[in-house]
């Protein structure tokens, strides 16, 4: 099959240094976060792909919509981090901001150092409701005071948003009708990068040591699984085996997840089987690693899990040249001029029935490596999109799918977590 890949750079936002969030909206269009987390006073902009013109619509900058200007002297509303949550029912795209961008007159920001400084401290994660039908911001609120939102999930039926805070790694519930948030408790210290929900409205994530953590609304508490998720034994423990990305199967019976760890693994989870679900180890997704070398999570990476209109799972995993000496060179030169180009971003296609994997395409940008994909999404026509993190200015990839991999309303059922 033929997959046509195109690169779309944030040329009107040349300071954009990361694209952490990319999601299908309730209108079937693709929404992207053009983040600026390194520059003093940097802010995030909401961008939408214009399929008709093959162009980008720069909709607005978040600081202006939530009354937290970039020159306030505080840490800025610099990024949306895995925190788009679309609602089919009302056409709203919910989004929440994260922290890391320094104040306009400082070179860096530390949330702990400035925690008690009202002039410097991050005001808090801004939650914003954007009507995709009218292109208007309906309202905004502070979701988590002083902290950022690492990831977000919407439960449409219960009218709740769920979030994980940073840096304290707490589990947050936001009531959309009452417009109030509630802190349920601390998970750990290493933030998971994803939440997912099951058919019983339970919300799942992971803790520091690779255990599943679950919030059950029936008992209103967090529970921790006694089992460790698949990881690369024996050189690894379960530490840092947290979720990086999770995609639900089209029938919503199971989810596929990739870990944020050295040599990331792919797994399939059936959350409603047994006391703690059934977890299938689908193995590593990046090349063999020399255990004598430290693992670089930015280079050895997997993300962008999304189901295509053909029912196949697509994801992007990094790959570098062959044997261990070449791997060593790739690691050592990764941040040198031209060095990162030795690391590729490979789009893989996996059949959920046979678990057979095939290389579908290479993601290439003309000026740099393209291996680090944050999130993937599918539009209503069935084309795939992948957010990219790399040299400034960043952007995203569009993969035009072959006709036999499309279907009407391919974006449904909609992914409701970032």
Image (cartoon, helix red, strand yellow):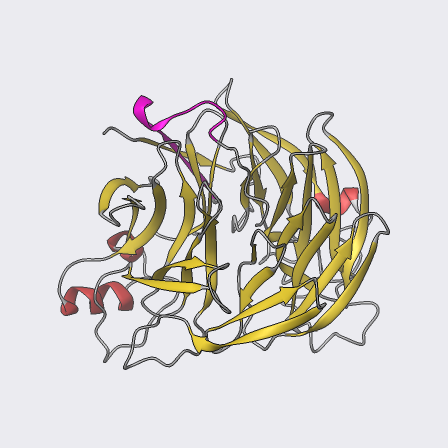
Number of marks in picture: 0
Left or right of 214, for residue 227? left
Q: Is residue 370 above or below residue 291?
A: above
Q: Is residue 405 covered in magenta?
A: yes
- The magenta region covers 395-410
Which x, y percent locates residue 3? Answer: 29, 31
Work out which quarter of the rendered image holds the N terminus and state it. Answer: top left
Tell me, yes or no, if residue 368 can be seen here: no
The image quarter containing residue 13 is top right
In front here: 353 or 11? 353
In front here: 346 or 39? 346
The image quarter containing residue 145 is bottom right
Left or right of 161, for residue 343? left
Left or right of 118, for residue 206? left
Residue at 39%, 69% in the rendered image: 261
Q: Is residue 239 above or below residue 332?
A: below
Q: Residue furthest front?
A: 274
Which x, y percent locates residue 94? Answer: 69, 44
Q: Is residue 34 above or below residue 402?
A: below
The image quarter containing residue 227 is bottom left
Q: Is residue 160 covered in magenta?
A: no
Q: Residue furthest top?
A: 52
Which x, y percent locates residue 274? Answer: 47, 66
Which x, y percent locates residue 383? Answer: 41, 30
Left or right of 126, for residue 259? left
Tell me, yes or no, if residue 173 can be seen here: yes
Q: Is residue 308 above or below residue 334?
A: above
In front here: 184 or 318? 184
């Amino acid at each position: 099959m033929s997959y046509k890949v195109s690169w779309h750079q944030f040329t009107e936002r040349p300071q954009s240094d990361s694209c952490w969030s990319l999601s299908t909206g309730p209108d079937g269009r693709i929404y992207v976060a053009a983040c600026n987390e390194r520059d003093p006073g940097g802010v995030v902009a909401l961008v939408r792909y214009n399929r008709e013109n093959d162009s980008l619509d720069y909709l607005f900058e978040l600081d202006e919509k939530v009354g937290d200007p970039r020159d306030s002297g505080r840490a800025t509303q610099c990024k949306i981090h895995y925190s788009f949550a679309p609602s089919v029912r009302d056409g709203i795209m919910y989004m929440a901001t994260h922290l890391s961008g320094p104040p306009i007159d400082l070179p860096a920001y530390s949330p702990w150092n400035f925690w008690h400084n009202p002039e410097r401290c991050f005001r808090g994660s801004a939650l914003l409701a954007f009507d995709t039908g009218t292109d208007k911001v309906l309202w905004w609120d502070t979701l988590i005071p002083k902290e950022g939102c690492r990831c977000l999930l919407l439960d449409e039926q219960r009218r709740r948003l769920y979030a994980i805070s940073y840096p304290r790694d707490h589990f947050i519930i936001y009531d959309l009708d009452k417009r109030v948030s509630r802190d349920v408790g601390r998970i750990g210290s290493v933030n998971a990068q994803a939440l997912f929900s099951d058919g019983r409205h339970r919300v799942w994530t992971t803790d520091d040591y690779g255990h599943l953590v679950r919030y059950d609304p029936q008992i209103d508490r967090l529970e921790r699984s006694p089992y460790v998720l698949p990881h690369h034994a024996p050189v690894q423990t379960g530490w840092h085996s947290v979720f990086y990305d999770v995609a639900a199967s089209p029938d919503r019976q199971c989810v596929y997840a990739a870990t944020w760890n050295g040599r990331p693994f792919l797994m399939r989870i059936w959350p409603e089987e047994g006391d703690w679900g059934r977890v299938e180890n689908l193995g590593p997704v990046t090349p063999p690693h020399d255990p004598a070398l430290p693992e670089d999570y930015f280079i050895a990476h997997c993300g962008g899990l999304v189901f295509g209109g053909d029912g196949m799972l697509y994801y992007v995993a990094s790959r570098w040249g062959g044997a261990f000496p070449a791997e060593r060179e790739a690691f050592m030169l990764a941040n040198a001029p031209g060095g990162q180009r030795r690391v590729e971003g490979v789009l893989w296609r996996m059949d959920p029935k046979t678990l057979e994997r095939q290389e579908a395409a290479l993601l290439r940008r003309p000026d740099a490596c393209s291996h680090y994909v944050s999130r993937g999404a599918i539009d209503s026509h069935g084309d795939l999109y992948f957010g990219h993190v790399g040299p400034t200015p960043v952007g995203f990839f569009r993969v035009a799918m072959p006709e036999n991999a499309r279907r009407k309303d391919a974006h449904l059922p909609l992914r409701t977590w970032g």
